[in-house]
Amino acid sequence: MPKTLIIIPTYNELNNITRLIPDIFERHPLDLEILIVDDNSPDGTGKYIEEICKTNTKVHIVHRAKKMGLGTAYCEGFAYALKRDYDYIFEMDADYSHDPKEIKNFLNAIEQCDFVIGSRYKTGVNVVNWPMHRLMLSWFANKYTRVITGMKITDSTGGFKCFRRKVLESINLSKIKSNGYAFQIEMNFKAIQNGYKFCEVPIIFIDRHSGHSKMSKKIVREAVFLVWKLRIQSMFHVL
């Protein structure tokens, strides 16, 4: 059975994570483990996970000194996974926008490809509780990314994903500096440039149950410029 790790970055996600971890294990009791990468959450998320780790060997935690961004959190999680020989490595949000019941569909899909993307747009628009301006921003961001990069992905900015370890081993994670939308785009682009095959599974994305979104204008600007940077770098083979 493949060794599977779900990486969940957290910052002030105590209300969500107390429900999410039991929910994941209830649905998948035998075949996976969870790594929380916590950015020193003031609400005590990290301390709560520490207590769980004392009694549950399938839950792990990486503590970070301060809020440092989604991209670097995932890269630390990837490094953790590669060092410990996990076969499949997930990205998953802590806020219940990614439904744990979909994990089995990812594990089925990855038998046919190298990395799996949970797509909000593969079968139409499957987003719940977003204001129209946020939905349009996301939809146009993905169309813009397809046009500039040439990637045939319907949801390049989505953050519910699963990689085979060989995909992550092929990417120099120390050079990944992007966050948010840009991080997801960059990981997809570099994986495809390295010759790996993706597949998309449709998901329904439900806006966070509690807490506040980390979206900002800075994250949007970063993604806008990154796609051109990736295209130019690929033209000169400097990825």
Image (cartoon, rainbow, N blue to C red):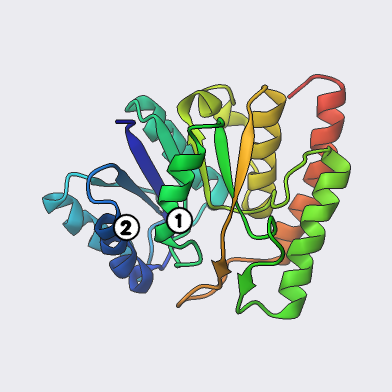
Left/right of residue 106 with respect to residue 226 in the rendered view = left
Please indicate whether residue 123 sits to the left or right of residue 43 in the image.
right
Residue at left offset 82%, top offset 61% = 140
Residue ID at (78%, 39%): 151
Residue at disc 2, secondary structure: helix
- The disc at residue 151 is none
Q: Nearer the viewer, mark 2 or mark 1?
A: 1
Specify whether residue 23 is in view: yes
The tag earlier along the polypeptide, 2 or 1, is 2
| Residue 6 image offset from top left, x and y in percent | 39, 46
* Image point (64%, 67%), residue name: 126
Name the kind of residue labelled 2 in the image: Ile
Q: Are marks 2 and 1 in contact (CB under 8 Å)?
A: no
| Quadrant in which the C terminus is drawn | top right
- Where on the picture, by quarter, is residue 50? bottom left
The residue nearer to you, when weighing 172 against 185, is: 185
Query: What residue does disc 2 label?
Result: 24
Residue 58 spot, x, y in % from top left:
22, 45
Instruction: Give the quadrant of residue 12.
Output: bottom left
The reply to whether residue 62 is visible in this rendering is no
Q: For the residue carrying disc 1, how many other residues have a C-alpha within 10 Å: few (<14), some (14-19), or many (20+)? A: some
Residue at the location (72% across, 26% down)? 193
Task: Say what amino acid the circle numbered 1 marks.
Answer: Glu
* Nearer to us in this view, 135 or 49: 135
What's the distance in space between the residues labelled 2 and 1, CA to CA?
A: 10 Å
- Residue at numbered disc 1: 102
Q: In this picture, is 137 found above or below 155?
A: below
